[in-house]
Image (cartoon, rainbow, N blue to C red):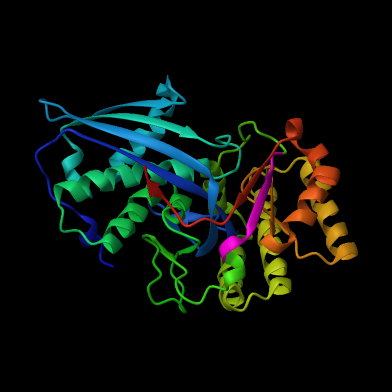
């Protein structure tokens, strides 16, 4: 789609309040490395989650001055430390929603999970905020189609956090151009569509909270370091090839092949961190303890469980709903000890954002 299609018109400010809940997502094919303004160097594919969400309410108040301003509250507390990231986001999207000038936004947000710890909190946060913005645009210009509403919400969310483009819809989304998906785009994410094997509609994701603290290196910094990584181009090709291999697997439900690709992608992501200049490690010793326990269980019990990692120390355990009882017992008996304060999040694949 042409960029011009996403440019709306100016409009007189109105009083408007809206609230949206957007989910986190967990990438199976990883996005790590970008160009220009949030254009990915390779396509990615993710599960949309269900319980790990950001809830955001925005009160749009007209300003007589015609200027733009905002206050951001997180968990009920005014948080000006988030303002630089939000200001960058609003500057990135102003061209596409010129009607934003003339408002003061009161933004109130909260998460059901720890932020800045590698559980894609920026993705859910920017997705929820973008949906609130699109809700007002839809009110101002009411002839908008539902398909365009979600497409532009994904487009705007990408300009705040690349992976946020994948937190609008579900249960499986793809962001980035792919030769086998004619509607795929670097500008927004698309839903997997028809043909997804039913086993993935209820796939489980138990997030083991190895470290709930803020990461030592942010995802934004990590993306920037890919510019000088000697293995970057091979990695981008690897991810694209892995997506090509995974797409038919998502239709067939071949879990053995699914597991191999998902775990390879997780380890390849962290290999890029360890080969950056300067190099860094986001995994913790307990991350590796969990990975080895998962491998041992899969070998001994033949259970279709695998792990993936986002940009952090926490481990996502992925498995079919039919095995939840056995794997939940394994988590409590063998893995909980490696989690900070014994905490983990039980989640599953979800259908996408909702208005509340």
Going 50% across and 43% down the picture, which residue do you hit? Answer: 53
How many numbered badges does the structure rendering display? 0
Quarter of the rendering containing residue 268: bottom right
Work out which quarter of the rendered image holds the N terminus and state it. bottom left
Q: Is residue 112 visible?
A: yes
Going 43% across and 69% down the picture, which residue do you hit? Answer: 177
Quarter of the rendering containing residue 272: bottom right
Work out which quarter of the rendered image holds the C terminus and state it. top left
Q: Position of residue 316 (x, y in %)?
A: 67, 51
Q: Quick check: 238 above or below 125?
A: below
Q: Position of residue 39 (x, y in %)?
A: 41, 57
Specify whether 198 is left or right of 194: right
> In the depicted view, which residue is nearer to us: 70 or 23?
23
Asked whether 208 falls inside the magenta stretch, the response is yes
Q: Position of residue 141 (x, y in %)?
A: 14, 52
Q: Quick check: 184 above or below 252?
A: above
Specify whether 48 is left or right of 281: left
Asked whether 30 falls inside the magenta stretch, the response is no
Q: Magenta segment range?
A: 201-209
> In the depicted view, which residue is nearer to us: 141 or 354?
354
> In the depicted view, which residue is nearer to us: 73 or 101?
73
Q: Residue furthest right?
A: 300
Specify whether 218 is left or right of 276: left
Q: Residue furthest top?
A: 77
Q: Position of residue 47 (x, y in %)?
A: 55, 59
Q: Is residue 238 visible?
A: no
């Amino acid at each position: 789609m042409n960029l011009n299609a996403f440019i709306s018109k100016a409009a007189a400010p109105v009083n408007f309040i809206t609230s949206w809940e957007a989910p986190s997502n967990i990438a199976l094919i990883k996005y790590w490395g970008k160009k220009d303004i949030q254009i990915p160097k390779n396509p990615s594919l993710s599960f949309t989650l269900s319980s790990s969400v950001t809830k955001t309410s925005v009160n749009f108040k007209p300003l007589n001055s015609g200027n733009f301003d905002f206050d951001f509250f997180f968990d009920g507390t005014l948080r000006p430390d988030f303002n630089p990231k939000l200001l960058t986001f609003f500057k990135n999207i102003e061209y596409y929603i010129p009607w934003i000038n003339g408002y003061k936004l009161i933004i109130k947000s909260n998460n059901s999970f720890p932020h800045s710890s590698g559980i894609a909190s920026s993705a859910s946060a920017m997705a929820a905020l973008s949906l609130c913005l699109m809700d007002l645009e839809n009110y101002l210009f009411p002839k908008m189609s539902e398909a365009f509403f979600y497409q532009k919400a994904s487009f705007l969310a990408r300009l705040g956090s690349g992976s946020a483009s994948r937190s609008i819809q579900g249960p499986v989304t793809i962001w980035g151009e792919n030769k086998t998906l004619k509607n795929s785009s670097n500008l927004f994410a698309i839903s997997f569509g028809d043909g997804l094997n039913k086993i993935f509609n209820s796939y489980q994701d138990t997030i083991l909270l190895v470290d709930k603290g803020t990461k030592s290196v942010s995802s934004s910094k990590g993306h920037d370091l890919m510019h000088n990584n000697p293995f970057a181009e091979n990695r981008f090709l690897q991810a694209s090839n892995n997506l090509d291999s995974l797409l038919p697997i998502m239709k067939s439900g071949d879990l053995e092949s699914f597991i191999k690709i998902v775990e390879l992608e997780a380890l390849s992501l962290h290999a890029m961190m360890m080969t950056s200049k300067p190099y860094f490690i986001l995994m913790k010793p307990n991350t590796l303890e969990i990975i080895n326990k998962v491998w041992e269980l899969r070998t001994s019990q033949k259970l279709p469980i695998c792990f993936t990692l986002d940009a952090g120390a926490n481990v996502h355990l992925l498995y079919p709903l039919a095995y939840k009882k056995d794997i939940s017992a394994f988590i409590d008996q063998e893995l909980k000890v490696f989690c900070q304060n014994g905490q983990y999040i039980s989640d599953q694949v979800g259908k996408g954002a909702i208005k509340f």
